[in-house]
Image (spheres, grey):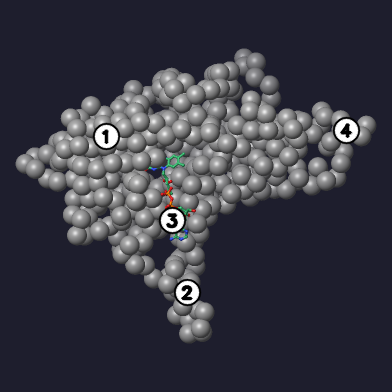
């Protein structure tokens, strides 16, 4: 018998998203919640980058031993979303660990074949190897076509040269799924995805980048780094397809993590508003506070519906969920930011103390609007879908949005969806 307190209704996504889930999802959600509240919530909050790195490795073992990462292997996106919502609510660092195991292994699961799956993805999803996903560079953030890391074919090896920045798990990952150019003249069509073990000759960890909410992040480099050609994921020149197909699938899970953080913030605000008395009454008696709580709850539920709809479409066999994934990610991460901010307001001064759960959420949720494609990039994707097939405008101002989102130039943004015919 579990001694956990009953779960608040705000923390039961399977109730809101019932139409998109099956019975097994509900029991998975309940079990993962028990695991997170009993095993993760009692952990000490990491106070430094080093502590976060150590704890991330420990959390990986816990997630792997418990079989919690199994849904990633079978691309059961609804379960992945439920897990990330639970982890986002209970322990954002655990959510980051889960997110990176998914990001680092999904390219391999999609296009790496049996050998690479056995060698890298499976151990990672058993918690035996930590994964990294290395796309971003100093001059290639949203604009992935600007990737300058070079992979030259020499005999039966690739030789990599270049640097990557903003890489989660940099310095603690056992391997990285790396995007490099095998044909610089071909731009985005010359990118190739490769698995680079952290102990490959010529691989270098350059050091950490420190976030206000500890999360292992850093810079890595390849200096004549040699890897066997068998470590290529998909074909030469297919790197962008592989990368975007991965992001397409995993963006709803970022949305789910955002929902988890919003749910926790709402719980904290509800609890505080009910307990705290001012002017002789509970805060929750004041209609201005009720207004905040109502808006928070409604935004959370709307975010969940977009999130689990996207995951349901994926699991139901829809080949592409680019539009729905972007809508879920953009809306849920922006909504979660608002919800967490309102929770801080409801807690007043206590909300900005550094050990307050809502202050930690405030710091943790911010990055979700940036990584795996910023909100602006998601909006470009959504607008492009809307404008596809529309006749070109002929009024004076009509050409601008078409130039921005309707037509695509070769130098355009990383997270924009590839042309339909390019998609794997
Ligand atoms: C916590 C964290 C973890 C991360 N982990 C990883 C990781 O593991 N692996 C990895 O490869 N990367 C990772 N990243 C990097 C992340 O993916 C990039 O930060 C993100 O893609 C944005 O790139 P940028 O920071 O260079 O911003 P830029 O691309 O320089 O964008 C700056 C601003 O300009 C806007 N902008 C850019 N282009 C356009 C446009 N065409 N139209 C309108 N607005 C535009 C953006 O939306 C943003 O607001 C991580 C980032 C963070 C914060």
Q: Is residue 382 left or right of residue 359?
A: left
Q: Nearer the viewer, mark 2 or mark 3?
A: 2
Q: In this figure, which residue is indicated by the disc labeled 3? A: 322
220 and 386: which is toward the camera: 220
Identify the element where label 4 is drawn: strand
Q: Residues within 10 Å of mark 1 (few under 14, many from 20)?
A: many
Sequence order check: which comes first, mark 1 or mark 3?
Answer: 1
Between label 1 and label 4, give the one nearer the viewer.
Answer: 4
Residue to which mark 4 is pinned:
278
**Quarter of the image where one finds residue 104:** top left
Check residue 117 in the rendering and tell me which mark sits there, or answer none: 1
Q: Which mark is residue 400?
A: 2
Residue contact between numbered discs 2 and 3, judged by CB atoms under 8 Å? no
Q: Is residue 226 visible?
A: yes
Q: Which quarter of the figure is the C terminus placed in?
A: bottom left
Residue 270 appears in the rendering: no
Q: Residue at x 48, y 85 (%)?
A: 394
Mark 3 Cα shell of 10 Å, populated few (<14), some (14-19), many (≥20) = many
């Amino acid at each position: 018998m579990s001694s956990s307190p009953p779960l608040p209704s705000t923390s039961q996504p399977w109730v809101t998203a019932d139409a998109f889930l099956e019975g097994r999802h509900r029991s998975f959600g309940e079990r993962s919640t028990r695991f997170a509240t009993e095993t993760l919530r009692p952990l000490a909050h990491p106070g430094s980058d080093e502590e976060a790195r150590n704890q991330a490795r420990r959390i990986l073992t816990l997630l792997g031993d418990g079989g919690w990462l199994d849904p990633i292997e079978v691309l059961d996106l609804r379960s992945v979303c439920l897990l990330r919502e639970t982890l986002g609510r209970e322990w954002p660092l655990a959510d980051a660990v889960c997110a990176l195991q998914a990001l680092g292994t999904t390219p391999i699961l999609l296009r790496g074949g049996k050998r690479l799956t056995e060698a890298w993805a499976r151990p990672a999803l058993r918690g035996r190897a930590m994964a990294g996903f290395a796309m971003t560079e100093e001059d290639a953030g949203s604009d992935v076509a600007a990737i300058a890391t070079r992979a030259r074919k020499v005999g039966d090896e690739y030789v990599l040269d270049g640097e990557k920045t903003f890489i989660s798990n940099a310095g603690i990952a056992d391997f990285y799924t790396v995007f490099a150019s095998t044909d610089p003249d071909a731009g985005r069509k010359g990118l190739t995805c490769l698995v680079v073990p952290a102990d490959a000759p010529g691989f270098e960890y350059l050091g950490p980048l420190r976030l206000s909410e500890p999360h292992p992040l850093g810079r890595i480099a390849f200096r004549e780094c040699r890897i066997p050609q068998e470590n290529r994921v998909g074909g030469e020149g297919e790197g962008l397809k592989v990368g975007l197909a991965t992001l397409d699938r995993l963006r709803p899970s970022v949305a789910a993590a955002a929902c988890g953080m919003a749910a926790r913030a709402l719980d904290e605000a509800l609890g505080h508003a009910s307990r705290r008395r001012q002017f002789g009454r509970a805060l929750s008696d004041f209609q201005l506070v009720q207004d905040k709580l109502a808006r928070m709850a409604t935004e959370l539920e709307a975010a969940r519906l977009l999130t689990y709809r996207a995951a349901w479409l994926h699991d139901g066999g829809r080949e592409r969920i680019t539009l729905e994934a972007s809508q879920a990610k953009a809306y849920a991460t922006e909504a979660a930011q608002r919800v967490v901010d309102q929770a801080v307001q409801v807690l007043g001064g206590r909300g900005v103390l550094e050990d307050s759960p809502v202050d930690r959420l405030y710091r943790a949720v911010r990055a979700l609007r940036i990584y795996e494609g910023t909100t602006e990039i998601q909006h470009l994707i959504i607008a492009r879908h809307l404008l596809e097939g529309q006749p070109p405008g002929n009024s004076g101002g009509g050409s601008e949005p078409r130039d921005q989102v309707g037509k695509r130039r070769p130098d355009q943004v990383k997270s924009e969806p590839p042309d339909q015919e390019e998609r794997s």
